[in-house]
Image: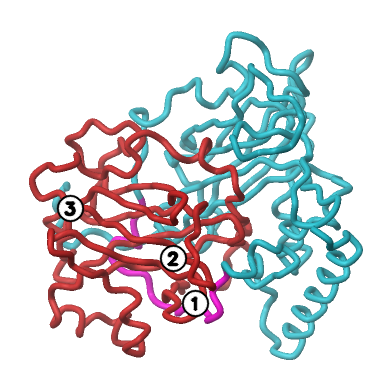
Chain colours: A cyan, B red
Amino acid sequence: MTDTQAQISAEIAARHEAAHEAIRRSGAPAPTGPLLDFDPYRSSILRHPTKNPKLVDPETIELTSPAFGRLDVAEIESDLTVQHSGEPLGQRIIVSGRLLDGAGRPVRNQLVEIWQANAGGRYVHQRDQHPAPLDPNFTGAGRCLTDSDGGYRFTTIKPGAYPWRNHANAWRPAHIHFSLFGDAFTQRIVTQMYFPGDPLFGLDPIYQSIPDQAARDRLVSVYDHELTEPEWALGYRWDIILTGSRATWTEPEGGEA
Amino acid sequence: MSGLHPPTPGQTVGPFFHYGMQYPGGLELVAPHSPGAIVLHGRVLDGAGEPVPDAQLELWQADAAGRVPRAAGSLRRDGITFTGFGRTATDVEGRYRFWTVNPGPIAGSTPFIAAIVYARGLQNKLHTRIYLPDDAAALASDPVLRGLEPDERATLIAERTAEGWLRHDIRLQGERETVFLAFD
């Protein structure tokens, strides 16, 4: 752990410049996702494919998605502040938004899963070595199903930033991990939602693995006073757009499997 | 694609996904040892050939008759309903396993299991396929496999074990790197 933040920041800047230069030369649109080969995130060095993915037409099972329903998720799982006998510490927040496909259509009745650190920046995980306190009243995992408008809503605690060992004095911006399903398995995404104005954005090799500022901005929630509940909780709004549009494939044999 | 809104980018699952994403029964698409049940197992390896102990795999597949599952209940298994979805994490030796069935052909197509890999250090999900090795003619006619070199093709086809199970390693990088897919 000898790399300094200055070294990592210089590497991030160089990688962004190279990515933007490649975009200028090729005339192709900026990539909408993270660069897999992005060595400022040190753990990625041996874990990114070196070949380009094969561009294929999705087929059969890939054009559909697993179904989730009331069997899978209890109503109470969307409130991360009521899972224990007492109230968790920290700033109570509401995180809400819509899950949409690339054509802007709502993705209904799909599973949304989240997990996050507590207010002190500590995860409930035995390998989290950060000497911040665990909160006996906060686990930090929740689920819900999107409604008929693609809407989701969680009540939780604003997570703290936390230190990690990518380099010396490395800190992740506060974030909530999100896992989402679409109408096709190809639309599946796992990502992270951030909070507006975080001073750590420029320093973080995970957030900065996305070379395009507009794409990075899509991971940042907005404070929404309409969502804020008086005497209760601050509201953050974050919409999620999946790749592509709804599958049109239907089962050819017409059976209700 | 024109007219589409730009998608939300993916990000790594990080090191602490287990308590957010893992759930009891995640790896049991069917009840262990039930009629027709097989184990699909293997390892996830990095570019140095070392096991990846903090990867997560998801499967999505047809049932044994080639029907696309429509039933909910993957998160609360009842031991009877086939939902077609499974999720597990690798162990300290990079190993994973699922209890499932051999997927049947959907409308005559070559059977495969759709799989997604996530890991700490992996910035985004990776899609791949796991094909059944048994029907050489079906494999030869598959449009995706036909577009690959033989050594690439081999990375997508599972091995049938003596027990009739399936063994399949996923290599994130390096020699025999698994073929990963991007979709139009």
Looking at the image, residue A223 lies above or below residue A251: above
First to last magenta residue range: A48-65
Q: Residue at x 79, y 13 (%)?
A: A231
**Residue B153 coordinates in the image, percent (x, y):** 32, 82
The outermost residue toward the right is: A6
How far is the residue under mark 2 from the one under mark 3? 22 Å
Looking at the image, residue A160 lies above or below residue A229: below
Image mark 1: chain: A
Label of residue A53 in the image: 1
Judge if badges 1 and 2 mark residues of a common chain. no
Looking at the image, residue B43 lies above or below residue A145: below
How far is the residue under mark 3 from the one under mark 1? 29 Å
Q: Residue at x 85, y 57 (%)?
A: A202
Q: Left or right: A191 with respect to B99?
A: right
Q: Main secondary structure of the magenta part?
A: loop
How far is the residue under mark 1 from the one under mark 2? 9 Å
Say if the magenta span includes residue A60: yes
Which element carries disc 1, helix, strand or loop?
Answer: loop
**Residue A223 coordinates in the image, percent (x, y):** 79, 37
Q: Nearer the viewer, residue A249 or B45?
A: B45
Which element carries disc 2, helix, strand or loop?
Answer: strand
Q: Nearer the viewer, residue A128 or A230?
A: A128
Image mark 2: chain: B
**Residue that numbered label 2 is attached to:** B127
Contact flag, marks 1 and 2 (Cβ < 8 Å): yes
**Residue that numbered label 3 is attached to:** B38
Image quadrant in which you'd find residue B161: bottom left
Q: Nearer the viewer, residue A39 or A153?
A: A39
Q: Amino acid at mark 1?
A: Pro
